[in-house]
């Protein structure tokens, strides 16, 4: 066994060695898998009084091995006076870690707050908390609404609850789940519009460099970016906003959110993407570092492939390429953790912007002048495997496509 350094993007299955998180103990410890949470806590810390208790934040992606969880619990969590966990994906996402932390909290009388990582109530998850559920729910609201000011007030409330301090706190400030993100580039209102969709969490955390650079690349090609943010693609407020802002106003859409709206068994049902009637390009904000990507024969990691390639394809999105990777901006000396942000890669951003322009040109080209090629794989074993797909009849699919084009 040996130790390896933590890296942006978290532990990679198959990596040799054991990943141990090195931190000094502190009265308050926060665990989350969201980089935007860490960014906002780091910014919120500067809004707190100088005498405020020390806070540690750990990225749960760095605690994926049982030994690393046990080590962190023994060296850091055992000396905490208040622990807050924010788990995306429910109890099963971090089941061993949750069991260890709950047992520790109950044995030592440490206040434990367990929050869902999204806006869906998870009463099983909330019930693992060791404080009153009304208190847990109120703390959840600060994290749910997000933003630096909300998290600063949430930390004050956490301190008063766990440490018995009397800082006091302001009520939660509500932020729209869906809204417009103002692009800073100068554009001509007559240029063709290109929609861009990003997560609300990135806007609140100021983690928008890839989208800002994408806006610049589009404007350089005389395209007008029209940017919306959303809490998630299933947010009920998203469709009305898309209709209001985008319908009839954009010629292409670049999506940077993950997952899919459509279930694989329901691909014949219309979705919000179909209403727009424009090509939807999937631009990937990779969850790993550029070094990991460059050094891997596979390229993107398994999480990226699932969340940002396979599932968006179910919605009919056109996969482009990764335009940004996680990079460690700094190691926060107070939180004793890495603050990670998305770093755009200029030539890859330019590629996606150029691709958007090409799709718009194709859209504006008269149908009789369009030329379409179907490229089929020829596997090396024998010609009988031409265009084969396991369980699929690819030649028949080609016939359906050609009939549809007619």
Image: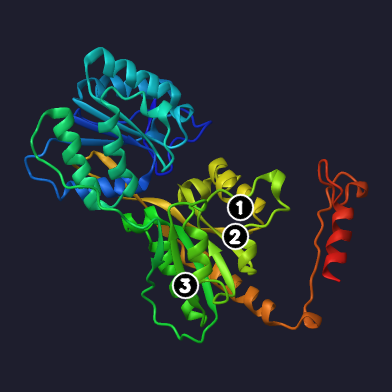
Instruction: Determine whether the residue tagged by mark 2 lies in a helix, strand or loop.
Output: helix
Using the image, tell me which numbered label, if any, was put on residue 272.
Answer: 2
Q: Residue at x 63, y 57 (%)?
A: 271
Q: Residue at x 23, y 24 (%)?
A: 111
Q: Is residue 367 visible?
A: yes
Report the Cα–Cα distance between label 3 and label 2. Answer: 17 Å
Name the one closer to the observer, 96 or 403. 403
Left or right of 69: which side holds 246? Answer: right
Query: How dense is the environment of label 1, judged by Cα within 10 Å: few (below 14), some, or many (20 and up)?
Result: many
Q: Is residue 387 above or below residue 115?
A: below
Query: How dense is the environment of label 2, judged by Cα within 10 Å: few (below 14), some, or many (20 and up)?
Result: some
Report the Cα–Cα distance between label 1 and label 3. Answer: 21 Å
Left or right of 232: which side holds 320? Answer: right
Residue under numbered circle 3: 226
Q: Is residue 18 visible?
A: no
- Image quadrant in which the C terminus is located: bottom right
Name the one closer to the observer, 280 or 293. 280
Q: Is residue 184 above or below residue 102?
A: below
Q: Residue at x 22, y 17 (%)?
A: 109
Residue under numbered circle 1: 312
Q: Quadrant of residue 337?
A: top left
């Amino acid at each position: 066994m040996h130790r390896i350094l933590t890296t942006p993007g978290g532990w990679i299955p198959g990596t040799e060695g054991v990943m141990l998180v090195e931190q000094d103990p502190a009265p308050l410890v926060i665990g989350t898998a969201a980089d935007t949470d860490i960014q906002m806590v780091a910014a919120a810390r500067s809004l707190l009084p100088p005498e405020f208790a020390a806070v540690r934040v750990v990225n749960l992606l760095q605690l994926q091995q049982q030994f690393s969880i046990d080590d962190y619990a023994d060296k850091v969590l055992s000396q905490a006076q208040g622990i807050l966990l924010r788990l995306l994906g429910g109890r099963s996402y971090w089941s061993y870690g949750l069991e260890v932390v709950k047992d520790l909290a109950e044995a030592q009388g440490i206040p434990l707050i367990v929050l869902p990582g999204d806006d869906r109530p998870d009463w099983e998850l909330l019930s693992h908390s060791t404080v009153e559920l009304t208190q847990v729910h109120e703390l959840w609201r600060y994290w749910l609404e997000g933003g630096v000011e909300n998290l600063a007030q949430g930390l004050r409330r956490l301190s008063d609850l766990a440490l018995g301090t009397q800082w006091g706190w302001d009520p939660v400030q509500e932020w729209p789940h869906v809204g417009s993100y103002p692009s800073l580039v100068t554009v001509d209102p007559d240029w063709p519009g290109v929609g861009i969709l990003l997560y609300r969490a990135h806007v609140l955390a100021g983690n928008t460099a890839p989208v800002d650079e994408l806006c610049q690349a589009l404007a350089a090609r005389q395209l007008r970016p029209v940017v919306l943010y959303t809490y998630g693609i299933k947010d009920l407020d998203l469709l009305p906003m898309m209709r209001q802002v985008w319908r009839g106003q954009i010629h292409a859409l670049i999506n940077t959110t993950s997952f899919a709206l459509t279930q694989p068994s329901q691909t014949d049902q219309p979705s919000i993407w179909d209403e727009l009637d424009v090509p939807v390009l999937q631009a990937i904000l990779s969850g790993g570092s550029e070094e990991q990507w460059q050094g891997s024969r596979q390229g993107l990691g398994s999480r990226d492939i699932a969340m940002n390639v396979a599932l968006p394809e179910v919605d009919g999105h056109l996969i482009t390429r990764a335009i940004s990777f996680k990079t460690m901006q700094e190691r926060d000396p107070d939180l004793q953790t890495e603050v990670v942000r998305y770093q755009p890669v200029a030539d890859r951003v330019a590629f996606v912007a150029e691709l958007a322009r090409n799709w718009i040109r194709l859209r504006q080209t008269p149908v009789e002048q369009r030329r379409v090629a179907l490229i089929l794989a020829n596997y090396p074993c024998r010609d009988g495997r031409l265009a084969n797909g396991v369980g699929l009849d690819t030649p028949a699919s080609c016939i359906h496509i050609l009939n549809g084009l007619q």
